Amino acid sequence: MKVVIIGAGVVGASIARVLSQYEGLEIHLLEKNADAGLGVSKANTSILHPGHEDEPDKYPLRAKLCIKGNRLWYQWTKELGIPAKWPGELMIAVEEEDMKVAEHYLELAQRNGVPGVRLVDHDELLKLEPNANPNAAGALWAPTAGLLSATMAAPALVENAVENGVRFHPETEVTGIKIEKGEVKGVETNRGFIEADIVINAAGLYSDKISKMAGIDYFTVHPRKGEYFIFDDDAEPKVTKIVHQTPTPITKGVYVITELNGGLMIGPTAQDLPEDAKEDTSTTREGLEFVWEWAQKLIKELPPRSMVIRTFAGLRPEPPDGRWIIDAYDDPWGFINAAGIRSPGFTSAPAIAYYIVEELIQGKLEIKLTRKSHWNPYRRALFFKSLPPEKQNELIKKNPAYGRVVCMCRGITEGDILDVINRMKRMGVKTITLDGIKMRTWPMVMAGTCQGSYCRIRIANIIARETGTPLWKVTLKGKGTEYGIGDIKVLLKEGVKENAE
Amino acid sequence: MQNEYDVVVIGGGPAGLAAAIKSKELGLKVLLIENREFIGGIPIQCVHPGFGLHYFREDLTGTEFIYRLIEKFREMEIEHYTNAHVLEIIPHSYRHKILKVVTEKGLLNIMTKTVIYATGARERHIFEIGITGHRVAGIYTAGEAQTMMDIYGIMPGKEIVIVGSGDVGLIMARRFTLEGAHVKAVIELMPYPGGLTRNIVQCLEDFGIPLYLSHAVTRVEGRKRVEKVIITKVDENLRPIPGTEKELECDTVVLAAGLVPYLKVIEKAGVIIDPATKGPVVNSYLETSVPGIFVAGNALVINDLVDYVVEQGEEAAMGAYEFVKNEGLSTVKWKKLVKGRNIRLVVPHYVSEAKDVMIYARVAKPEENIKLRFPEIGKEMRLPFVKPSEMIRIKLRKRDIAKAEDKITMEVVPNE
Ligand SMILES: Cc1cc2nc3c(=O)[nH]c(=O)nc-3n(C[C@H](O)[C@H](O)[C@H](O)COP(=O)(O)OP(=O)(O)OC[C@H]3O[C@@H](n4cnc5c(N)ncnc54)[C@H](O)[C@@H]3O)c2cc1C
Ligand SMILES: Cc1cc2nc3c(=O)[nH]c(=O)nc-3n(C[C@H](O)[C@H](O)[C@H](O)COP(=O)(O)OP(=O)(O)OC[C@H]3O[C@@H](n4cnc5c(N)ncnc54)[C@H](O)[C@@H]3O)c2cc1C
């Protein structure tokens, strides 16, 4: 049986990984970008939510799959070598009356079956998080919350899925879905037709467009922007816990976290954009000011503005009323939606994948699947910086490239970069991009104090050498994002040509 | 411990090379460590003249200048590692430090009596100067663009907007123009240009490149690559004035918005940083607050001229020599150099009557017809003008320093 999955974000990649555990499937994972995980899954808060923020009657899928996803990630991050930590989360009640809001979420935790959640008073809050706002009334404490290196997740999932037989097709954009007699037959792409018995739509912000291609057009997905600041790795104070506030009518909450790369991160905003603004990941002055103002209420002080090393924005794929569209249909048979997967979509992705495979494919569509006897759950990941000195020495002996530090801010070596390039090639990435390398290193290369002003050219050079591409043609994230425009004399040569004409 | 040195120089730019050469001349056992595959630092990529007027008494290009230093360094057969990176400096005892170094031969622990830290400066990037908008291709720091063009021979873009009118920005404007690019504008936040008048004339006016003073690039727009920038007028407090936004179409943004001493490694060793220079607090031997760790060049303070950088490298070497010879610098009474009226920064921070000292300072605002004054020691000099872009370099003599009690103020006052 042939399965096509559209979109290699965290949702599509998770589905590919789960499906790769079954026998007799030919699985094609299609992605329009040059790499997996360059869409929504690249820019978010990276929190593995405990699951006590969604009303079970209003959002039954979100409530159910979030808790399950949180548990699954505990195992998946270990199997896949994705950096993760589990610091727990404090929903801070800044004022006394906010404690009532916290109580509401305590009740939700009970109803959703989230373990360990309880209210803490002012004193315990400060014990749990000494850098919390010293005037806060108290907090709701949810110990199962985690953080992962979100940028690495989709690439790692796909790498593992490919090890287990999935075929990854980057730079392949789905332009149509072929349906005959109420059954899907395959997808049209810029690279030709791909046959399929089952087509799974995990196209994030564009999942409404894909659904429409299959004739299911009752919904649209609009972008909701979230903006952030990231501080330098050594900016103080930091937080040990995930910190946010009790939601208000104005905001569902700005978070303060110490992200896995080491720096403090604050955000996001939640700004609704028109349906056609699906590429507008620009930051705005207003949005950033909003984040700054709200984050200040959560911790005793923010690091100075001069320690900010990056600002960025991501877009949530918002379905109508915030309800995920995860379903299989009688007509067209074989088409499955995992559409409008907004927050907590990252957390829930593994559970969404199991839901689709178990309840929709095997349940609703009544397709019998058998598990493979051999399936490799592991991805061997290696980060020079986090190894003990003996291991580092061994690596350098084997490959002197590990002795060349290319990123001085974060101590990433040429060996790390080469390892990533090889992984990308093995998994089927056709264009090795600078962003692809950034997402797979840890801590992320070109993303520290200097933001790549020292090392981007060195890494571009390694890509050029390893792929036989002219240096200027190396791209940030695929076609149209080339590093340069030609050799140094390109404009003068053009000028001469124009003069001659 | 594989080895033990009198001095290890970290960074092989002009400051580091000068420090290593001087150390060897003074008879010290010296090792230089450079992260990149070649020594030379920034001047390697500077194909324009303006280097070495003081030091070699000749106007050289950066490449010519550094070639001379490298030749000398090679002739003296100074031990050095390239492609080697210092991860950590551990002050082991007052007399010794251990350096943890990653090299192609493995991890090394190197023992040394002193360290000269000469890692240069990093460039301020787009996120540090509050520019919002899209994070797309076509955005470079000036140094990165220069490396692309003059080391690797590739062209960054065609329609250029340069942020910052310091010498680096001005020189890059000319460099781009000479390769056939169209520099649409140089944008400067301050009401006056950041670079030398000579460079305004030779790099902008000669090519008809517009300079927008009191303007900021506030936003970058584009889908995949830069398509345009929004520039906005700023008020006296450097805040953007709403309603004054203007679009400039371009495909490339080059940031020449200032340099910051690159101190990753010594910050962790515990040196104290001066918020004005963003470099370490030093005494007149250029020793930091950690005994035996010296600093020179752009890692100490952002210099305009490579000649000063070299001078600081040599000064640090002499400090290291004193330290090695006496097992620590002699105890003297340090007198603080205090910033008075219109002085934004000054190094060194502490001086003593044990030696003459060269001081390097910058003013906060341009001013004409002034006196530079050191009231405690009764020293003053007239100058036709001072400006932030031109570093002031003056020697203070021992006998003058001796006149002060415990501080010496440096100030700019109108010349009545
Ligand atoms: C600001 C923000 C903060 C968030 N914070 C959190 C959080 O802390 N915790 C949490 O759990 N969740 C969070 N989320 C939600 C989470 O990021 C998303 O739910 C999740 O990443 C969605 O993944 P996806 O795979 O559906 O979408 P994507 O990652 O966008 O994947 C879809 C892929 O489909 C591809 N595609 C689109 N059209 C086509 C086509 N025609 N042909 C081929 N490929 C196509 C796209 O290129 C893309 O790669 C946050 C989201 C945002 C924006
Ligand atoms: C565009 C431009 C134009 C200029 N024009 C002029 C001019 O006309 N005239 C003039 O006099 N000056 C000019 N300068 C300034 C001059 O280049 C600098 O003042 C000088 O290079 C500073 O020298 P440095 O040794 O302090 O630092 P750098 O030259 O930056 O050298 C520092 C070295 O340290 C290495 N390093 C850093 N960290 C580590 C580590 N942890 N371990 C090992 N090695 C490390 C770096 O790789 C580098 O090689 C210009 C600079 C620029 C960018």
Image (cartoon, grey):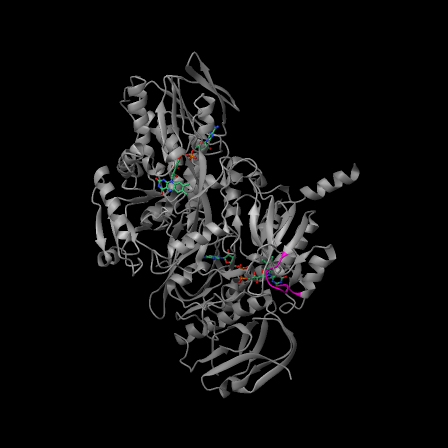
Left of A464 or right of it: where is A142? left
Q: Quadrant of residue A123?
A: bottom left
Residue appearing at x 28%, y 50% in the figure: A90
- Range of magenta residues: B187-196
Q: Residue A32, relative to residue A447: is it above or below? A: above
**A493 in the magenta segment:** no
Q: Position of residue B396 (x, y in %)?
A: 55, 80
Residue appearing at x 26%, y 58% in the figure: A126
Quadrant observed for ligand 2 in the rendered image: bottom right
On-image quarter of the C terminus of chain A: top right
Q: Position of residue B246 (x, y in %)?
A: 63, 51
Q: Nearer the viewer, residue B285 or A240?
A: A240
Residue A262: tell me if it is visible: yes
Residue positioned most to the right: A500
On-image quarter of the N terminus of chain A: top left
Q: Nearer the viewer, residue B338 or B7?
A: B338
Residue A38: tell me if it is visible: no
